[in-house]
């Protein structure tokens, strides 16, 4: 079904550049951590934009923000959205495009007085990144029943502030009854965050699923010592043990099917002339094949244990987050594909290497995603970039898909 697409590019890019100012860091990046002052500032602006577009705004007990546009019929809504929080030194497109292009779809429907059969809701999910409060997607995972409210509220940042107190502090602790109810479909537009679309010169990625992700946290405890008088053979150096573990995680476990990423590293004491007695780090293991991922997690645990035994240091390895590979809804994928074909854009099917709120939305309703190319495949860095013409194509596809899905 051909629909005229008249997104308002000036409005869209004005909103995007405003978002790019809130939490701006050098290199055109963003630091807008979940439930931070910057997140509050952006939420307030987004709320005002939603109200200006005639949406009814509500906030649930996880701080998820919903803007609702009524339809002709009291049917379950078509839902569009993503997240406005970013990595500590992230980009200005990750998550943001999904929320702002959803708003642009609403504004375009308004511009042309289009009344859809189904209501349309747009959503900003809390803490998708999991950079401040682990694990990721606490907002979408909360409404999908993956995490209960008590668990989410108890999560603490590195300074010991809890999710609950920060949600309260910024004034976005809403009501449980405001959570998203039954919905017809969820479509999340997002940047690819990898090199495939650019490499194959494709304008749109039609996302069929998301790979599985496992997070481990590891604490190695040896003995702190003076760096000078302590002979090497008498040391229990926690950092050297961790270094050997990290080297072997890459050499023995990572491969073309399984990615392994070590991060969030801290050592104490952390000075030039002390042997570190305690080291903390995380391990992120991903694969599109769940059995390979689970095998890799077990091999990592064994490797960590064996290195520490040999070095006579203690170690505690705990599972922080586990998600299986998911496949999106065929009907929604087809609706996206039809919109892409109608618009004449080049596209390819793709499985997401990154996690998204759509992962959990897929647990509770028909879901799929639209990807836009990332320049040089870069993301989670200030230099993250998606070109204007690709943003416009994405807005057109999201608009067309929404109009199609919102028709009974
Ligand atoms: O970890 C992820 O893949 C997502 O960006 N939070
Ligand atoms: Mn994201
Ligand atoms: Mn991200
Ligand atoms: Mn804090």
Image (cartoon, rainbow, N blue to C red):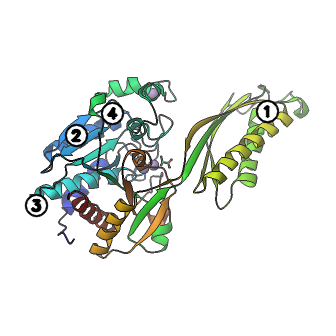
Rendered location of residue 157, percent (x, y)? 49, 29
- Report the disc number at residue 237: 1
> Which residue does the numbered mark 4 point to in the structure image?
63
Spot occupied by residue 291 in the image (x, y as percentages of width and height):
65, 52
Q: In the rendered view of the protein, which quadrant contains the C terminus?
A: bottom left
The answer to whether the beta carbon of the residue marked 1 is less than 8 Å from any atom of ligand 4 is: no
Residue at the (10%, 61%) spot, across then down? 112
Foreground mark, 1 or 3? Answer: 3
Q: Decide: marks 3, 2 in contact (CB < 8 A)? A: no
Check disc 3: other Cα within 10 Å, few if <14, some if 14-19, many if 20+: few
Instruction: Give the answer, above or below, for where 236 lies relative to 258.
Output: above
- Which mark sits nearer the N-terminus, 4 or 1? 4
Q: Is mark 4 within 8 Å of ligand 4?
A: no
The residue mark sitting in front, 2 or 4, is 4
Secondary structure, mark 2, is helix
What residue would you read off at disc 2?
A: 47
**Residue 313 or 23: which is nearer the viewer?**
313
Mark closer to the observer (4, 1) = 4
Marks 2/1: CA–CA distance: 51 Å
Report the number of numbered marks: 4
- Mark 2 or 4 closer to N-term? 2
Please determine whether, in this image, residue 227 is positioned above or below residue 330: above
Horizontal arrangement in the rendering, residue 393 relative to residue 323 (left or right): left
Left of 3 or right of it: where is 351? right
How far, Cα to Cα, is label 1 from label 3?
A: 67 Å
Q: Position of residue 148 (x, y in %)?
A: 44, 29
Asked if labels 3 and 4 touch by Cβ distance under 8 angstroms, the answer is no
- The residue pinned by badge 3 equals 112
Mark 4 and mark 3 lie on one chain; the one further toward the N terminus is 4
Q: Nearer the viewer, mark 3 or mark 2?
A: 3
């Amino acid at each position: 079904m051909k629909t005229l697409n008249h997104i308002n590019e000036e409005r869209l890019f004005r909103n995007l550049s405003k978002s790019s100012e809130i939490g701006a860091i050098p290199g055109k990046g963003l630091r807008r951590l979940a439930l931070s002052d910057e997140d509050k500032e952006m939420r307030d602006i987004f709320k005002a934009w939603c109200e200006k577009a005639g949406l009814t705004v509500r906030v649930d007990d996880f701080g998820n923000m919903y803007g609702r546009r009524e339809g002709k019929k009291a049917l379950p809504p078509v839902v569009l959205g993503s997240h406005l929080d970013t990595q500590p030194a992230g980009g200005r497109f990750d998550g943001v495009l999904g929320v702002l292009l959803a708003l642009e779809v609403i504004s375009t429907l308004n511009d042309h007085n289009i009344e859809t059969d189904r209501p349309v809701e747009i959503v900003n999910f809390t803490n998708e990144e999991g950079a401040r409060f682990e694990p990721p997607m606490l907002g979408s995972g909360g409404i999908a029943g993956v995490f209960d409210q008590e668990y989410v509220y108890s999560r603490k940042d590195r300074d010991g502030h809890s999710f609950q107190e920060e949600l309260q502090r910024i004034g976005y602790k809403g009501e449980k009854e405001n959570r998203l109810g039954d919905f017809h479909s969820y479509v999340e537009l997002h940047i690819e965050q990898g090199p495939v679309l650019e490499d194959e010169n494709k304008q749109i990625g039609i996302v069929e699923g998301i790979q599985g992700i496992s997070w481990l946290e590891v604490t190695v405890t040896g003995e702190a010592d003076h760096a000078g008088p302590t002979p090497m053979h008498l040391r229990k150096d926690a950092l050297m043990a961790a270094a050997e573990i990290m080297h072997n995680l890459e050499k023995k476990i990572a491969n073309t099917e399984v990615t392994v990423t070590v991060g969030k590293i801290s050592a104490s004491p952390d000075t030039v002339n002390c042997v570190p007695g305690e080291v903390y780090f995380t391990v992120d293991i991903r694969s599109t094949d769940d059995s390979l991922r689970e095998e890799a997690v077990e091999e990592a645990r064994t490797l960590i244990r064996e290195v520490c035994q040999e070095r006579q240091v203690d170690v505690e390895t705990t599972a922080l987050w586990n998600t299986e590979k998911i496949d999106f809804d065929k009907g929604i994928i087809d609706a996206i594909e039809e919109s892409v074909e109608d618009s004449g854009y080049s596209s390819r099917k793709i499985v997401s290497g990154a996690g998204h709120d759509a992962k959990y939305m897929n647990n509770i309703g028909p879901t799929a995603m639209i990807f836009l190319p990332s320049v040089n495949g870069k993301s989670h860095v200030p230099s993250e970039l998606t070109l204007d013409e690709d943003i416009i194509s994405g807005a057109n596809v999201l608009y067309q898909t929404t109009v199609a899905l919102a028709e009974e």
